[in-house]
Amino acid sequence: MTDQPRSIEVPEALDGTRFDSALAQLFPEFSRSRLKTWILEGCATLDGAIVAPRRSVKAGQLVSLLATPDEVTAAAPEDMPLSFAYEDEHVLVLNKPVGLVVHPGAGNPTGTLVNGLLAFDPTLAQLPRAGLIHRLDKDTSGLLIIARTLEAHTHLVRSLEAREIAREYRAICLGRLTAGGKVDEPIGRHPTQRTKMSVHRSGKAAVTHFRVLSRFDNFTFIACRLESGRTHQIRVHMSYRKHPLVGDPLYSGRLILPAGSSEELQLLLRGFKRQALHASRLAFAHPISGVPIELQSDLPDDLQALLQVMSKSAFSAAEFNAMAWPKVLER
């Protein structure tokens, strides 16, 4: 974010173009809607004068833009421990713990990730949703991208919409999957249970790819990739395939302890009160430099413990963390 105006001379190629269109081409790092707001607020000028968005520009005229912050995130800063997998002046990638609500809302006005981010970096209050580009459910752990500047925010939102940010998850589902596959089913709000999502024809397009990493007697450890980012997408899609995630309080139904399972596994399953889902890997181009960034987050302790008991210690924690598609995060 800058508090000094940026000025660019209108090139011959933009002679006769509308002011708002010229501005969008001269400052592509900002969204058209934000640029239009700045025009109407007088933060974008032509030869020092405030003009209408439809005003035509001439080659050689001077376009100036003062990118003013918008106080769009209203939440109280709260100190809390936050762990970052990546950090620079433009972008953060958080390793979110289980149990942390991302956004303030009804029932969670404080103690959320947004509150913590505003304490970590108060300038994030100038960005939509404190710079958060996507979200994770309260009881899903793993990697989250946060923009720290308007320019980075615009680029990352566009990248997410263009499916240029690759996201890989790890999950443990009920039953033995024979092979990987794809779920291409629309997701929308459940027609009668408003806290749930469901697959139905009037929902929004949603595609989840999944791959088997390891099979156990009554469970399967899988990797999932998203083409879309609908609420509860992996949880809904795997439940639709009759393989809901272990511990999922909304989509797996009542706890069933498989016949013949060990006492240790039964104890772990009874105490596992959240969906077995972890956002394990991210790949994206840095929003400013364009340099490729690939990050991995190891499975949290509760998932590692569950897997080790399910596998009867056939694998180590490090081996479970290393499992993935042969080429990580193809875009």
Image (cartoon, helix red, strand yellow):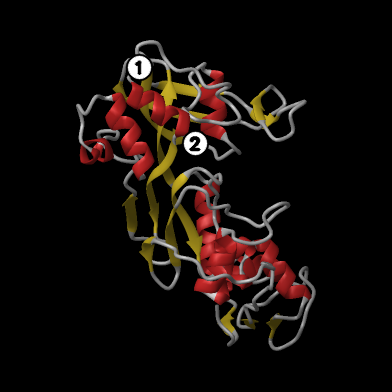
Task: Name which residue lies at 68% across and 31% down.
Answer: 188
Q: Position of residue 88 (x, y in %)?
A: 39, 70
Q: Position of residue 271 (x, y in %)?
A: 46, 34
The residue indicated by pointer 2 is 227
Q: Nearer the viewer, residue 61 or 98?
A: 98
Residue 63 visible in the shown view: yes
Q: Which mark is residue 261?
A: 1
Of pointers 2 and 1, the one earlier in the residue sequence: 2
Q: Is residue 92 above or below residue 1?
A: above
How far apart are the alpha carbons under marks 2 and 1? 35 Å
Q: Nearer the viewer, residue 27 or 314?
A: 314
Task: Name which residue lies at 49% across and 36% down.
Answer: 227
Q: Position of residue 194 (x, y in %)?
A: 74, 33
Q: Is residue 128 above or below residue 189?
A: below
Q: Is residue 147 left or right of residue 279?
A: right
Residue 331 visible in the shown view: no
Q: Indicate the secondary structure of the residue bearing disc 2.
A: loop
Q: Position of residue 243 (x, y in %)?
A: 48, 19
| Residues marked 2 and 1 touching at CB (< 8 Å) | no
Q: Is residue 235 left or right of residue 88?
A: right
Q: Quadrant of residue 249?
A: top right
The label nearer to you, 2 versus 1, is 1
Q: For the residue marked with disc 2, what is the amino acid?
A: Glu
Q: Nearer the viewer, residue 157 or 177?
A: 177
Task: Name which residue lies at 67% across and 69% down.
Answer: 35
Q: Is residue 46 above or below residue 118?
A: below
Q: Quadrant of residue 299?
A: top left
Q: For the residue marked with disc 1, what is the amino acid?
A: Ser
